[in-house]
């Protein structure tokens, strides 16, 4: 009964949104060297009902699976499918979303993408590097970031989770293993009805204190300004910080609950910087993260707006920064946590 309810909910969101994606970010360990690398796996679809066997890039209408790694300016391999190859199935205790031969569910993801060098160079519409990835991973959502309740507009519906991954991912035949408890994973589901003039998503699950000790903490920030009827709406933001099993929530979508004191997301020729200060009834938070563009990659998507061809997002898997958390005491704020953050995943679009 619960699975049927979940499937109906997913189908409703799919029917009510023009494009949607499931984003997964995690660390995996090289079986040979022990080196850690950051990976992402994205299942994405836009207007699948408008195509059948072949994807359509002009409208656009397709399902896409994209996998990448931040290495030598970034590698991202994409495979595309017509709408007939996008399905939702009910399997006993869970639903599964199928895109071609790739699968994603609440607890599991499996698939393979491949594109040869000649095909990647010939077809710019594929927005892809050449290479091959295959993966089989179990996942467990641990902490919801409540963004579905905080960022809901007529244009967007998002859900984010701190997620543990376990299993194997291969890049050009080389094997990496995601280890539960060390994957520092993140999952986001997005259901969108429009393009947007501004989008920033920052997630960090790797924190240390001033002594260099790991701290059980995770941070998620989403800020977005959708474009509806050719008009950009006001920025909506939601920030969740979980530290040592205590949750701090900041959002301007809940009336009177929080406010931004200072915020900027800046892009120059060399780097992307995200900084925010926000307060609620019991606390204040300051965050600052940055990454150099030479370590980042650009993710390109077809735009829903016919006046734009594509949207380009800067994407980082190794951003660094800090979080300062103050708790309110009487009429002042007392510093409770001062943590350094590493290996943050930052997705940034600034029109």
Image (cartoon, rainbow, N blue to C red):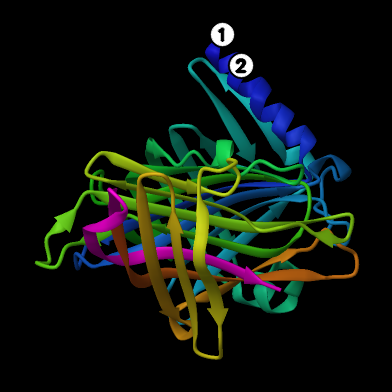
Q: Position of residue 186 (x, y in %)?
A: 42, 49
Above-or-below relation of 346 to 186: below
In the figure, 294 relative to 132: above or below?
Answer: below
Horizontal arrangement in the rendering, residue 210 relative to residue 96 (left or right):
left
Residue 158: horizontal and vertical position, in percent?
Answer: 60, 43
Magenta range: 326-351
Q: Residues within 10 Å of mark 2 (few under 14, many from 20)?
A: few
Q: On the image, which quarter does residue 98 sit in?
A: top right
Q: Which mark is residue 1?
A: 1
According to the picture, the residue beneath numbered tag 2 turns out to be: 5
Residue 101 lies left or right of residue 71; in this view the side is right
In the image, farthest residue toward the bottom: 269
* SS category of the residue bearing label 2: helix
Q: Is residue 173 visible?
A: no
Q: Is residue 296 left or right of residue 54?
A: left
Of residue 274 and residue 109, the one placed in the foreground of this image is 274
Cα gap from disc 2 to disc 1, whole angstroms: 6 Å
* Label of residue 149 in the image: none
């Amino acid at each position: 009964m619960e699975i049927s309810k979940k499937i109906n909910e997913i189908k409703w969101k799919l029917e009510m949104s023009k494009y949607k994606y499931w984003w997964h970010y995690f660390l995996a360990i090289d079986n040979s060297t022990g080196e850690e690398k950051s990976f992402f796996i994205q299942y994405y679809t836009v207007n699948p009902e408008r195509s059948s066997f072949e994807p359509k890039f002009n409208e656009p209408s397709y399902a896409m699976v994209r996998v990448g790694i931040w290495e030598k300016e970034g590698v991202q391999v994409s495979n595309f499918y017509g709408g007939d190859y996008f399905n939702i199935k009910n399997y006993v205790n869970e639903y599964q979303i199928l895109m071609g031969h790739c699968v994603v569910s609440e607890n599991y993801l499996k698939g393979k993408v491949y594109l040869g060098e000649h095909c990647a160079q010939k077809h710019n519409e594929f927005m892809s590097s050449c290479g091959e990835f295959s993966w089989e991973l179990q996942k467990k959502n641990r902490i919801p970031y409540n963004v579905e309740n905080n960022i809901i507009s007529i244009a967007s519906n998002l859900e984010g989770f701190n997620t543990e991954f376990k299993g194997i991912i291969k890049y050009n035949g080389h094997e990496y293993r995601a280890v539960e408890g060390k994957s520092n994973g993140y999952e986001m589901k997005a259901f969108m009805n429009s393009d947007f003039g501004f989008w920033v998503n920052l997630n960090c699950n790797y924190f240390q204190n001033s002594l260099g000790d790991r701290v059980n903490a995770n941070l998620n920030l989403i800020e977005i300004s959708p474009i509806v009827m050719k008009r950009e709406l006001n920025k909506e933001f939601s920030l969740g910080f979980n530290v040592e099993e205590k949750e701090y929530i900041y959002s301007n979508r809940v009336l009177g609950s929080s406010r931004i004191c200072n915020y900027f997301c800046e892009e120059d020729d060399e780097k992307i910087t995200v900084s925010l200060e926000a307060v609620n009834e019991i606390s204040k938070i300051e965050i600052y993260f940055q990454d150099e563009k030479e370590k980042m990659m650009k993710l390109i998507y077809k735009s829903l707006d016919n006046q734009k061809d594509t949207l380009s997002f800067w994407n980082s898997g190794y951003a660094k920064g800090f979080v300062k958390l103050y708790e309110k005491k009487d009429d002042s704020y007392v510093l409770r946590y001062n943590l350094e953050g590493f290996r943050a995943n930052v997705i940034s679009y600034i029109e």
